Image (spheres, rainbow, N blue to C red):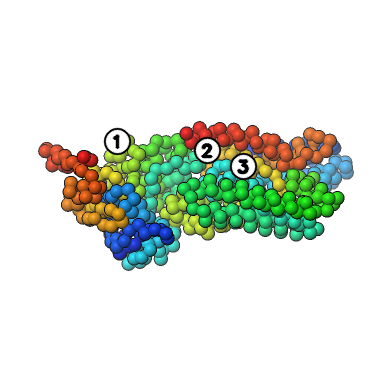
């Protein structure tokens, strides 16, 4: 395993660049690389572009917000996944496993049920995610066990299925002609409805949570050691854990509120990033952000181009994530035995 | 400086492990903690580290309660060497040692050049500088124990507390760790370690503290305390003594 920063960061940057180019260029209205650079360059410098107005509209208005949202959501989920995995000392933990996504999902379907706007839905989704993770964590900590990690994962599964029942109840009660399709669409994860107005409520919480995680990057290394060891190294583990969980949940919930439930990114990308630069958080976090952004851009481009209709993102990430997870389990088995 | 426990009652919220324990460790001295399994060694060690609050009595550094220190200030005085373990993530040896510098940096900082210099010196001190770039998960058990010792040294503490530093090490590495413990005391550290082997205490420690059922059985200079009679009483099992006629050195065998 290489743990050098520069080659890993270069590969991750290349993945993001490839994702950006592919996401802008491919679609029902293809945009050439030259045209793309022309539009972006003239936008940045305020010059008159030579590309047609239709091309400009496709790049700036149609694909632009969606590209930014995909990059942000992918980066956010990967960073949050890395944070959760480190904090719970388990490479198989993801924001989904701890119930952040199912809590956010319940919040969001309630928001749709009560016909709230995007801000209202986002606030409910964020609150739901935070409460769910706090509940999972609180219960896991109360049930003292020889294997706290296992208890935590199982608690997450249990709380997640309870929240799933809540989502089911709200869907059952929802207006089947207006609300239910919106909920179903939202729960499968999609960036199809993303426009420029969605970017602020998405980018704000992601920036805030990411800043906290980046600021605590070295402490997160220490937090991935056994509890008593981290404390003996001078880290107050209780407050630190709350800060990391809150920041990672903020980032996750903002993503889920904007794009719906997109599983697997938070699990798969941190593993790829660790394979590139190692587990050291100061290196891992930027690599995760770049790789996660590029990964979701590629997935989202697939989602809108492989079929005549949009394929939900959650379905595509699951198709890629499941075999990866099984491969991961096989590897873990070898290490444990 | 002295790291001491005064009339400690130790244990957990639902279980008292030991009562009326007095223990003191000065800088430059090695104290070995011996006793049967479940006798309270690890609990006493964690209480002196400040990781565990005493149920009664007080653990102190000089005249100040260890609980009155912040985690960070405490970590700059007392370092902990846990039993060698296999961590979840494959940090490099250098990163593991640099984690010892955490208490010397601010909340949002990461180790700087001077921290790297301290970590390098600690790695060199234990002769493992060549492992610097290796993943901690891919080195041997003996090397891991040395890495954890280097991390404790990088913490620049006055006291180092080790939990069974020789457990699960091969014969050669046990000897090496014992020598390093002596070297740490020679450089002015107060060292406290637990062990299941009285011979290790005899070799590396100045004083021994015998703990059984949460009570102090005996304490004093190793030559006075570590006798056949004391060990038989401590472990409730027969013990044989071997003496080298040439050097007068003694060793114990479980009978």
Estimate the x, y position of residue B54 in percent, counting from the top left: 37, 62
Estimate the x, y position of residue B11 in percent, counting from the top left: 38, 58
Dot 2, crowdedness within 10 Å: few (<14), some or many (≥20)? Answer: many
Chain hosting mark 2:
A
Given residues B203 and A100, the one toward you in this image is A100
Q: Secondary structure at mark 1?
A: helix
Going from the N terminus, do you reach mark 3 or mark 2 first?
2
What distance separates the C-alpha of mark 3 from that of mark 2?
20 Å
On screen, residue B129 versus residue A268, left or right, reads left
On screen, residue A184 versus residue B165, left or right, reads right
The residue shown at (60%, 56%) is A135
Q: Which mark is residue A267?
A: 3
Dot 1, crowdedness within 10 Å: few (<14), some or many (≥20)? Answer: few
Circle 2 sits on which residue? A3
The residue shown at (73%, 50%) is A168
Tell if the residue under mark 3 belongs to the same chain as the one under mark 2: yes
| Quadrant for the N terminus of chain B in the image | bottom left
Q: Secondary structure at mark 3?
A: helix
On screen, residue B29 versus residue A337, left or right, reads left
Q: Quadrant of residue B84?
A: top left
The residue shown at (86%, 50%) is A177
Check the image and report above or below for A114 versus A277. Answer: below
Tell if the residue under mark 3 belongs to the same chain as the one under mark 1: no
Estimate the x, y position of residue A22 in percent, counting from the top left: 75, 37
Chain hosting mark 3:
A
Given residues A312 and B90, the one toward you in this image is A312
Q: Which mark is residue A277?
A: none
Circle 1 sits on which residue? B172
| Quadrant for the C terminus of chain B in the image | top left
The residue shown at (45%, 55%) is A231
- Between circles 3 and 1, the one closer to the viewer is 3
């Amino acid at each position: 395993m290489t743990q050098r920063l520069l080659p890993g960061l270069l590969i991750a940057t290349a993945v993001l660049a490839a994702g950006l180019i592919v996401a802008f260029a491919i679609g029902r209205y293809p945009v050439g690389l030259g045209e793309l650079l022309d539009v972006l360059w003239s936008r940045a410098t305020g010059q008159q572009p030579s590309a047609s107005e239709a091309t400009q509209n496709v790049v700036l208005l149609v694909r632009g917000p969606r590209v930014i949202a995909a990059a942000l959501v992918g980066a956010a989920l990967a960073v949050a996944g890395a944070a959760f995995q480190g904090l719970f000392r388990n490479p198989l933990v993801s924001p989904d496993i701890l119930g952040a996504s199912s809590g956010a999902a319940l919040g969001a379907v309630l928001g749709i049920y009560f016909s709230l706007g995007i801000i209202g839905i986002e606030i409910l989704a964020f609150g739901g995610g935070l409460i769910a993770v706090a509940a999972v964590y609180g219960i896991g900590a109360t049930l003292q066990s020889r294997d706290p990690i296992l208890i935590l994962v199982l608690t997450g599964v249990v709380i997640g299925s309870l929240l799933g029942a809540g989502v089911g109840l709200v869907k059952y009660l929802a207006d089947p002609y207006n609300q239910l399709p919106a909920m179903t669409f939202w729960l499968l994860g999609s960036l199809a409805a993303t426009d420029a107005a969605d970017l602020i409520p998405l980018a704000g919480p992601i920036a805030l949570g990411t800043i906290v995680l980046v600021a605590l990057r070295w402490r997160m290394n220490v937090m991935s050691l056994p509890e008593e060891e981290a404390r003996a190294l001078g880290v107050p583990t209780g407050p630190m854990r709350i800060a990391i969980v809150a920041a990672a949940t903020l980032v996750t919930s903002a993503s889920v509120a904007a794009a719906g439930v997109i599983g697997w990114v938070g699990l798969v990308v941190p593993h790829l990033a660790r394979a590139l630069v190692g587990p050291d958080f100061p290196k891992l976090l930027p690599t995760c952000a770049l790789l996660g952004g590029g990964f979701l851009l590629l997935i989202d481009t697939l989602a809108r181009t492989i079929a005549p209709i949009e394929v939900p993102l959650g379905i595509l990430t699951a198709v890629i994530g499941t075999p990866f997870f099984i491969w991961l389990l096989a590897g873990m088995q070898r290490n444990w035995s | 400086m002295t790291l001491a426990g005064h009339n400690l009652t130790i244990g957990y919220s639902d279980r008292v492990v030991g009562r009326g324990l007095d223990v003191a460790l000065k800088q430059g001295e090695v104290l070995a903690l011996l006793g049967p399994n479940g006798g309270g060694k690890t609990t006493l060690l964690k209480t002196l580290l400040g990781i565990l609050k005493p149920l009664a009595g007080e653990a102190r550094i000089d005249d100040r309660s260890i609980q009155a220190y912040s985690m960070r200030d405490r970590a700059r005085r007392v370092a902990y060497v846990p039993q060698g373990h296999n961590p979840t993530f494959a940090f490099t040896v250098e990163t593991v040692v640099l984690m010892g510098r955490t208490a010397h940096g601010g909340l949002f900082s990461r180790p700087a050049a001077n921290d790297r210099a301290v970590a390098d010196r600690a790695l060199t001190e234990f002769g493992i500088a060549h492992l610097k770039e290796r993943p901690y998960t891919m080195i041997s058990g003996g090397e891991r124990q040395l890495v954890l010792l280097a991390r404790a040294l990088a913490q620049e503490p006055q006291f180092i507390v080790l939990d069974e530093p020789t457990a699960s090490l091969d014969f050669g590495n046990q000897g090496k760790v014992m020598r390093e413990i002596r070297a740490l005391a020679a450089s002015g550290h107060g060292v406290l370690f637990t062990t299941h082997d009285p011979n290790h205490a005899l070799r590396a420690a100045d004083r021994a503290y015998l703990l059984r059922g949460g009570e102090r059985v005996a304490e004093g200079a190793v030559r006075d305390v570590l006798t056949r009679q004391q060990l038989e009483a401590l472990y409730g099992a027969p013990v044989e003594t071997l003496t080298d006629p040439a050097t007068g050195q003694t060793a114990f065998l479980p009978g």
